[in-house]
Amino acid sequence: MEFIPAGEIIGEAHQVRTVKIKQSPQLPDGEYSFVDTYCVDPECDCRKTMIQVMHNGKLVSVINYGWESATFYENWMGGSSKNI
Ligand SMILES: [Zn+2]
């Protein structure tokens, strides 16, 4: 699986969402950007996005989100998650 930013796929129509956080008890102050990336492997059918969370230009977290049902991913992974 190779994931690339959506902006490299759809161009200028893409928008990176950002939030500014100040004086949060849990997070450092600053700007947080959410860069959604998508799999470009034509042999892969993972149907998910990996959202890179950037804080002041540094990668601080990745959100892994799949938009299909749990059943889809169970089948995609080759079995039921109840057996894991
Ligand atoms: Zn994939």
Image: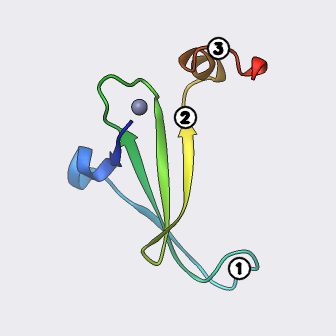
Helix, strand or loop under label 2: strand
Q: Position of residue 76 (x, y in %)?
A: 54, 18
Quarter holding the C terminus is: top right
Binning the other alpha carbons within 10 Å of mark 1 as few (below 14), some (14 to 19) or many (20 upward) gives few
Quarter holding the N terminus is: top left
Name the residue: 42% across, 51% down.
Answer: 36
Placement of 40 over or under 58, stated as above or below: above
| 19 relative to 23 in the view: left or right | left
Say which label, 3 or 2, has the lower sequence index. 2
Q: Position of residue 44 (x, y in %)?
A: 38, 25
Say which label, 1 or 3, has the lower sequence index. 1
Helix, strand or loop under label 1: loop
- Looking at numbered disc 2 in the image, what kind of residue is underneath it? Gly
Residue contact at pointers 1 and 3, CB within 8 angstroms: no
* Quadrant of ligand 1 in image: top left
Name the residue: 24% across, 50% down.
Answer: 8
Q: Position of residue 77 (x, y in %)?
A: 57, 21
- Looking at numbered disc 1 in the image, what kind of residue is underneath it? Ser
Binning the other alpha carbons within 10 Å of mark 3 as few (below 14), some (14 to 19) or many (20 upward) gives few
Which residue was labeled with disc 2? 66
Placement of 76 over or under 35, stated as above or below: above
Name the residue: 33% across, 47% down.
Answer: 4
- Looking at numbered disc 3 in the image, what kind of residue is underneath it? Gly
Q: Position of residue 20 (x, y in %)?
A: 54, 77
Corner quadrant of residue 41:
top left
Helix, strand or loop under label 3: loop
Q: Which mark is residue 24?
A: 1
Q: Which mark is residue 79?
A: 3
**Is label 1's Cβ within 8 Å of ligand 1?**
no
Q: CA distance from mark 1 to mark 3?
A: 41 Å
Binning the other alpha carbons within 10 Å of mark 2 as few (below 14), some (14 to 19) or many (20 upward) gives some
Q: Viewer-nearest of labels 1 and 3?
A: 3
